[in-house]
Image (spheres, grey):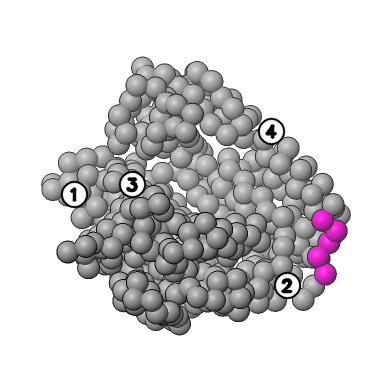
Amino acid sequence: MVVSKVFIDTFGCTFNQADSQIMAGNLVENDFEIVNSIDDADVAIINTCYVKQPTESKVTNRIQKLRDQFPELKIIVSGCMVEIDPKKLDKIAPETSWIGPHQLNKTTNVVKTTLNGEISRECGFSKDTKVGVPKIRFDELIHIIQICEGCLGACSYCCTRFARGKLNSYPISEIKKEAKEALLDGCVEIQLTAQDTAAFGKDTNEKLSDLIKEIANLSKDPDIKNDFRIRVGMMHPNNIGDDLEDLIKAFKQPNVYKFIHIPIQSGSDSVLYDMKRGHTLKDYMKIVNRFKSEIPDITIATDIIVGYPTENDLDFKKTADLLKDLKPGLIHISKYRHREGAPSSVLDEIPHEVMKKRSKYLTEIKSEITQDENKELLGSVQKVLVVEKGSKGGFIAKTDSYIPVVVEDVVIGTFVDVKITEVTSTYLKGILT
């Protein structure tokens, strides 16, 4: 029997990576082969992200380039673009098949139909679970679990919610079962991902703090011999609510990374209101300061949107002042661009030169903050988990605060003690002790 070969090209977030792993699992269960090179493939699945304009450009360029370079190759488009911008997708690649992000269980059917020379398009929403289904792990030591899909927000600049829909949380018992199976399979890191992990359980009367504790407690299971770490994905401050104190307790567990990703987007209450974020600067700082007071070595990651259409010079100054005061260990800076269907797209964008200047200024602040924060670790000994090979040699390990450390002569998947010998604004360097 001739086995058809499928190449999956993934753009975007951890959640999208997990979607690709589900599609791969569905295909392997049905006797397809997943290949690492498009040159070997009969079919290519392009799993799209549409959260930012630069990513949209990368995705559309990739699809068009593949059509030109591989005219005989069958192409299937999956991911957020399918639901957010089907008109554009149909215009740039009218002959492609589609798999919507809620239709992953139909991947094999779409691939078979496409190989037969027909166009198959599976779109629309469903409440199908993404936990406990077959997956092909792309990193054998890191397991991604989608704990819920969709969100409760109405952010004015966001188009992702049109693709992911309303909140659909999966049961703690099923998530814990998948985590245990991954640990028994030798994984050393469990990544809990969602559009908003803080929204988990708001529709099912369960709590994120309970979920984290349940998975952390797997370390006490006699069947699990390996040490491991848990990374919790992005939390919208508006949904942490009355779970704050229990979340802090959950993050204090020794095998949970001391790392929280809580986007603020702007330091101006006026802009936050226009963005329909649902929280104030005071609300945000209350959460972050509680975490920092209880877990002093915690890494705070945040997101900033520069140049929202109603952002004036004073609003921008408030954002810059916030970063100087908060000193986040990780800052994602994005220049505002209109997104398909997002309510803010009816507003006039501010001049791009102004946006560029503001972004440059924040990037300079970001570098100063992270360099200063990392300097405090110089000479310290850190227990780190080695997670991958470095792109420029050596290996990348993560401290308990999720700070990357470059180290030599180690084995991926092991915990080692390293002395920090050098610091930069983005990573540390260390030697084995």
Quick check: 24 left or right of 427?
left
Name the mark nearer the viewer: 3 or 2. Answer: 3
Amino acid at dot 1: Leu
Q: CA distance from mark 1 to mark 3?
A: 15 Å
Q: Secondary structure at mark 3?
A: loop
Q: Identify the mark nearer the N-term, 2 or 1.
A: 1
Question: Percent from the top left, x then y, of residue 112?
Answer: 31, 74
| Crowd rating for badge 2 (residues with CA inside 10 Å; few <14, some 14–19, many 20+) | many
The residue carrying mark 3 is 139
Q: CA distance from mark 4 to mark 1?
A: 42 Å
Q: Secondary structure at mark 1?
A: helix
Name the mark nearer the viewer: 4 or 2. Answer: 2
Whether residue 253 is visible, yes or no, is no
Q: Is disc 1 in contact with disc 3, using a CB cutoff of under 8 Å?
A: no
The residue carrying mark 4 is 368
The residue positioned 62% from the left and 35% from the top of the image is 370
